[in-house]
Image (spheres, rainbow, N blue to C red):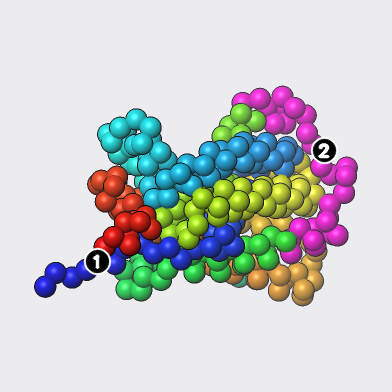
Amino acid sequence: MPTRVRGLERALDARSLAAVAFGEIGSSLFFALGIVAAYALGLTPWVLLAVGAVFLLVSLSYAEGTAAMPEPGGASAFVRRAFNDPAGFVTGWVLFLDYLIVIALAALFVPHYAGAALEWEAVTEGPWDGVVGMAAIALIAVIRLVKRTQLYRVAIVLAGIALATQLLIVVLGFALVVSAGDLSAGVDLGTAPSWEELAFALALATLAFTGLETVANLAAEVREPGRALPRSLFGAIAAVVVVTTLVAVVGIGAYPGGTELGDEWRRAPLVGIVVAFGDSASVDVLRLLVGATGVIVLLAAISTSISAACRLAYALPAGTCCRAPSPASARGR
């Protein structure tokens, strides 16, 4: 007798989906902040805010698309419906590259957060940082094969950890290191940063908001997609934009001009911000906490990106086979 394959279940409500969206997109700040600061320098908060505003507009399109077509696939499903199957298939393979980039970046930053927190320099230098990164990907892949935990359960925990850490940095940063004069220190538009660096920083700032496709792939698992998807996506991304900008302001307050943040602390920027709070036992504890949080959040980001890639692969062979059944069709079975 053939074995029945378990499909996707509608288990997400609006609150859970908002938590998933915030956790997925907010986790990108752990690796994007230092990269953007390396080129945007003192304009880092405003670059992130500008790109975040664009992503808010993009989220409206995703919200409408996923509400109208509550099925896995994300942009590939939209393109397939708008044009044809080959165009959707090509878009899907481009999205696989997006997931691979997120997985690779998250894995490469894991040893740097661990090393910065523990002051273990060996693991932050080549080739060992690459070795540890590859080991992290292999470990998550094996765990996903052995224990297939529901994606939303992992992502909700990820959201709570990321939000708590980022808010703690914002509160302490504004109390300890942020002053109005520091936000414009070292900024000479056209020179520091140059126009070429600013343009490149705007492109790099999109790294801070990766994860939208991962959330869109959950459309088939939302209980009331017509209501939950638009509100959850837009609300979560708005929260991410605000928190990301505030953390970047604290980063520029801690390192006026952004040079040190984008150089010395490029691969562990949130730990670098904490180090700027001072030299005390409490700061050492906070440094260890932020480093451990960075490792956990980045490992979870690898896991959820792998899961999203699996959902995309599930959706690519045929557009209709993986669409969640409508209530009418379900009653007719």
Asked if residue 191 is among those painted magenta in the image, a careful observer would answer yes
Q: Is residue 44 positioned above or below 300 on the image? A: above
Is 153 on the left or on the right of 35, as rendered? left
Q: Is residue 42 positioned above or below 237 on the image? A: above
Q: Nearer the viewer, residue 124 or 100?
A: 100
Q: Which amino acid, by three-letter code, is at mark 2?
A: Ser
Mark nearer the N terminus (1 vs 2): 1
What percent of the width, then of the height, locates residue 324? 36, 55
Q: Which amino acid, by three-letter code, is at mark 1?
A: Val
Magenta highlight range: 168-197
Query: Residue at 40% across / 38% down in the picture?
Result: 78
Q: Which residue is mark 2?
A: 184
Query: Residue at 36% across / 36% down in the picture?
Result: 81
**CA neighbours of label 2 inside 10 A, class few (<14), some (14 to 19), many (20+):** some
SS class of the residue under badge 2?
helix
Q: Nearer the viewer, residue 285 or 202?
A: 202
Q: Which residue is mark 1?
A: 5
> In the displayed image of the protein, which residue is found farthest to the left?
1
